[in-house]
Amino acid sequence: MKTATILMRHCGALLIASLLSAAQAAPGPGSAHGPLELQEVASGLEHPWALAFLPGGEGMLVTERPGRLRRVTAEGVVSAPLAGVPEVFARGQGGLLDVALSPRFAEDRLVYLSYAEQGVDGRAGSAVGRGRLSDKMDSLEGFQVIFRQQPKLSSGIHFGSRLVFDRAGYLFVTLGENGQRPTAQELDKLQGKVVRLQADGRIPGDNPFVGQAGARAEIWSYGHRNPQGAALNPWTGALWVHEHGPRGGDEINIPQSGRNYGWPLATHGINYSRLPIPEAQGERVAGTEPPHHVWTKSPAISGMAFYDGERFPAWRHSLFIGALVQQALIRLQLDGDQVVGEERLLEELDARIRDVRVGPDGYLYVLTDESNGKLLRVGLQAN
């Protein structure tokens, strides 16, 4: 299968409308619904991790894991790093991670960032803060931390850190267990949890563990390993989360209030050493929720986006997920909440897919996790 023609400009790749027809005519990677249309929007991004679309055609904000936030215009011009971004723990899997806009961005211009933050003993944990995007879009003003994962236990792995606002304006944050497996079951710690906050970081009064002795009131669900994908289902309004298993057992969950999702007691995976997980009791354990969907062989999943756009009707009711190890864009076909089909896209790129989002134009936008990371626009070619 031939690789798609990709339009390149190394110093801030340009998306050139006049060349679009030529790109569409070129043989491209295939899919179940025909050839793909693939364009490079930008390159030269150092391990980009996440993106968020600005309203009004103002482009995108893109995080780079070493600690930079950039704006990429619709034409593919990459800005200088924005000022006002917090210092990050850029070690191992840590760094500047997710980015999300306030649900009231048109009024408050607030940008939320998640990132790895170092503690006094050299260990790190996830943190979330917000700042106002300046009128010139070159800085975050008045950045304030609104949440910190406690205690800080990571030496550089399993930060989780996806950010999702629900329809009521609550902020969900996914948190890895920092490589400390038992903590995912310990309610006095914020490792291996999904937490639910108000937009300013305060704790909602109806969170499931509010008022319970020995439990953190921020917690929404627990028993997670390293959740690096989260999105709101556009048809039901429910939060969906996916997480890395160990050697096998990547899974999707629909986390419910107060529920236990099993790690490390219940897992479909084994240790990287090929030995069993010491705490594991089986694939299903009483008192824990089974995964909504599971891969027995781990793609190493990251990023998540539901497709409900009008531009490509064949992709409606699909869930797109990036794969790091298996280097593909995974499309799951949904029937209601059930996964009824799967296909792999972009395998020809030979690139780790870190994030995927649906743009306001109905195309998919994909970030490749490389030292020369790229922002790609993906669609289906017209018949």
Image: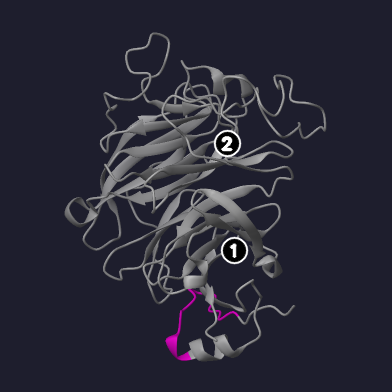
Residue at screen point 23% across, 56% down: 134
Q: Quadrant of residue 168?
A: top left
In the rendered image, the residue lying farthest to the right is 274
Q: Residue 47 at x, y = what percent?
A: 56, 55
Towards the viewer: 375 or 357: 357
Q: Would you place residue 344 above or below residue 266 in this image?
A: below
| Neighbourhood count class around disc 2 (C-alpha, 10 Å): few under 14, some 14–19, many 20 upward | many
Residue at screen point 57% across, 24% down: 288
Q: Which residue is mark 2?
A: 226
Residue at screen point 57% across, 29% down: 178
Three-letter residue code for mark 1 = Asn
Q: Residue 45 at x, y = what percent?
A: 52, 62
Three-letter residue code for mark 2 = Asn
Residue 351 horizontal side relative to residue 275, left or right: left
| Mark toward the start of the polypeptide (1 vs 2) | 2
Q: Residue 190 at x, y = what percent?
A: 47, 24
Q: Is residue 352 visible?
A: no
> Quarter of the image containing the C terminus?
bottom right
Query: Could you tell me which secondary element the residue under label 1 belongs to?
Result: loop
Q: Residue 88 at x, y = what percent?
A: 46, 40
Q: Which mark is residue 372?
A: 1
Q: Quadrant of residue 290?
A: top right
Towards the viewer: 347 or 61: 347
Magenta residue check for 12: yes
Q: Are marks 1 and 2 in contact (CB under 8 Å)?
A: no
Residue 239 horizontal side relative to residue 54, left or right: right
| Neighbourhood count class around disc 1 (C-alpha, 10 Å): few under 14, some 14–19, many 20 upward | few
Distance between the Cα atoms at labels 1 and 2?
25 Å
In the rendered image, the residue lying farthest to the front is 335
Magenta residue check for 236: no
* Range of residues picked out in magenta: 6-18
